[in-house]
Image: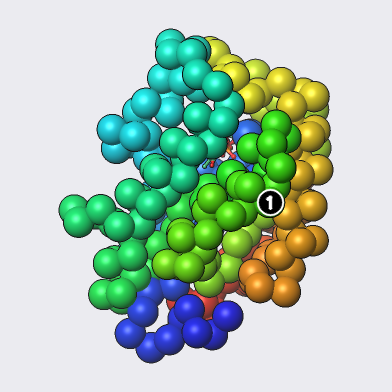
Amino acid sequence: MTEHATENKGCFLAFEGIDGSGKSTQIERLNRRLAQRGIHCYVTREPTDSPIGSLIHQIMTGRIRSDNKVVAALFVADRLDHLLNPTDGIKQKIDSGIPVITDRYYFSSYAYHSVDMPMDWVIEANSQSAAILRPTVTVFLDVDPSNALGRIARTRFHTELFETKSRLISVRQQYFQAFERLKDEENLLILDGKQSEDALAEEIWEKTKGFFGL
Ligand code: ADP
Ligand code: TYD
């Protein structure tokens, strides 16, 4: 793990969880608290806003129809572009010492796509991203799918393709399977996402501030 947080490199936090688990809320809070301490992060998300990411968004909202295997492959391409594109690729930010926080990274692919296809394929298809940049830590916010759907229903006008209860139950199970498989090579922080926003923000702060040298 320390190899990813060597002196001149920024640390890289990936937040994971099923839809509605509170990732964006907590990323915003962590980012704000870091900024108050003078640490300015590059905050980003997948799917990205790149042309590949917008294609994915159009598929997720049902405007374009596509097979799940194609979607999985598009996420692989979107992630590589997220890492490597010359304008705002996260690899160059990390290399120049800027800390990066992302809302979703390759564990999202492992969990969401292994519902329809073998996890081995998904892990192998993402192996280039893993070789280029592993998160300093992956923070998983664990929330019960009914709870997460209740939160989503309260705040969004539409739900996306993957936001059904049975789907989210499978996705959550697949996350845990992926964590079990990769626990020796990944740094994982699995947190109880049912806590209040304040309590969770405090736990995340206490457990991640060290990665930022605080
Ligand atoms: P995600 O980015 O994982 O989809 P959000 O941060 O957008 O999740 O949160 C989904 C909804 O749940 C939002 O309406 C948010 O205000 C609410 N929410 C976030 N964290 C909590 C929490 N700890 N307890 C209750 N509701 C929460
Ligand atoms: P979005 O609404 O952008 O995010 P969130 O639910 O986190 O607020 O939707 C992203 C969706 O894309 C979400 O359902 C998870 C899915 N997804 C994949 O299927 N594979 C992936 O590799 C990634 C990064 C996301």
Residue at the spot of label 1: 120
The one of 2 and 150 positioned closer to us in this rendering: 2
Which residue is located at x 39 percent, y 43 percent? 78
| Identity of the residue drawn at 38% across and 68% down | 99
Ligand 2 within 8 angstroms of badge 1 C-beta: no
User: Closest to the observer: 189 or 194?
Assistant: 189
Judge left or right: residue 100 versus residue 151: left
Q: Quadrant of residue 189?
A: bottom right
SS under mark 1: helix
Q: Nearer the viewer, residue 34 or 84?
A: 84
In the displayed structure, would residue 15 be above or below residue 113?
below
Q: In the visual, does 200 lie left or right of 87?
A: right
Residue nearest the viewer, comparing 16 with 179: 179
User: Mark 1, residues whose alpha carbon is within 10 Å: few (<14), some, or many (≥20)?
Assistant: few
28 to the left or right of 68: left
Total numbered labels placed on residues in the image: 1
Asked if residue 154 can be seen in this view, the reply is no
Residue type at the position of mark 1: Asp
Report whether 6 appears left or right of 167: left
Q: Residue furthest bottom?
A: 7
Residue 212: percent from left, percent from top: 46, 76
Q: Give the residue drawn at x 70%, y 31%.
A: 116
Image coords of residue 97 (percent x, y): 31, 76
Q: Position of residue 40 (x, y in %)?
A: 32, 65
The picture quadrant for ligand 1 comes to top right
Q: Is residue 99 above or below residue 144?
A: below
